[in-house]
Image: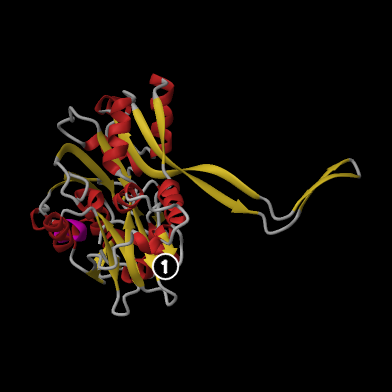
Amino acid sequence: MVGLGKIMTSLKWENLCVSENSSIRDAIEVLNRTGMKIVLLLGESGTLVGTVSDGDIRRGLVLEVGLSDSISKVANYNPVVVAEGADIGQVRELMREKKIHQIPEVNLNRQVVGLHFFDDIADKPELKNWMVIMVGGKGSRLMPFTKETPKPLVRIAGKPILEHVILRAKSEGFRNFVLAIYHFGDQIEAYFKDGKELGINIEYLRERSPLGTAGALSLWNPRQLLPFLVTNGDVITDLNYASMLNFHLHHHASATMAVRMHELQNPFGVVEVEGLKLTGYSEKPIHYSRINAGVYALDPGVLDLLQNNAFCDMPEFIEKIRSKSNNVFVYPSDDAWLDVGNPTDLSKADQVILKNPT
């Protein structure tokens, strides 16, 4: 399992479904709206009866099939599918063998439970850039799970939270990781060791006292020559780490912060007044704000702004960088994101991942 899986990607497979009674125009509208190259054709019981690709439609139009004609005239009623819970490596090889870029995943009743895209599961080139994961906190909000276990080793769907984070980054080409440890750090180090069992390289920043979400970076020696990522160890997300790094490099940024939109709905009707006169009314309005997603890209030069072995949280550090260079960017993301901060979040993440294995 890497990230939150298929159900929590920014584009859900449900957006690609149409009824078997649809027209070719309906399928084209789905393709245009989603930017994808496949439409899933569902029967009355929600079962997969076929697929339609952009190529199927182009071939149909060449044969003078009309836009108002039934989608059945261009549909593939024998699509390649994989069973629920299929191994990603096997799915990847099947795609290569069949020379296809999308494969639906179906359960025993042939109902769609996911959709694999080759671009998402193809082997990514290895990156030389490092990822630093801050895992030194006590995880007090997750008590009693963290009474004798460090938060990063609390399990979701059978794997520690931190392992999900690492495997997600590995799937995008990251092979070099630094874990900043303090509370129960020996347990984390005993579990992950040097990372060879996961096919990666892991080093450690061992805090002798809590240094915050940025202070541990002052312990990193020798200094790196390439930009690197920093993430909180309790953030599970489908954010594309490699794309964020490329964004950072493209803008020649000193620092880049991933941000996401957060909506907060007022449970009450809001009344606007001037004095005692009613001037407006909004029923349960929604307020939007940009929030820090807990993932950062940093230029190695900014580490000079940290005092060695001194406490510093990342928001304070980002502000230092901004004041010094005025070259801090934000990377907008609408990808699935979950900060596993309390037992409710832990239960939510567990259910999502168990229901949608990858």
Q: Is residue 79 magenta?
A: no
Q: Does residue 303 appear in this view? A: yes
Residue 315 placement, left or right of 228: right
Q: Residue at x 91, y 43 (%)?
A: 277
Residues 6 and 293: in front is 6
Give percent across and percent down for residue 151.
Answer: 32, 60
Q: How many marks?
A: 1
Name the residue beneath numbered marker 1: 20
Residue occupying the far left of the picture: 196
Give percent across and percent down for residue 350.
Answer: 35, 68
Residue 60 placement, left or right of 197: right
- Note whether 26 is above or below 81 in the view shown: above
Range of magenta residues? 187-191
Residues 331 and 23: in front is 23
Q: Is residue 189 magenta?
A: yes
Residue occupying the far front of the picture: 64
**Label 1 neighbour load within 10 Å: few <14, some 14-19, many 20+:** some
What kind of element bears circle 1?
loop
Instruction: Kindly indicate the quadrant of the structure image that contains residue 79.
Output: bottom left
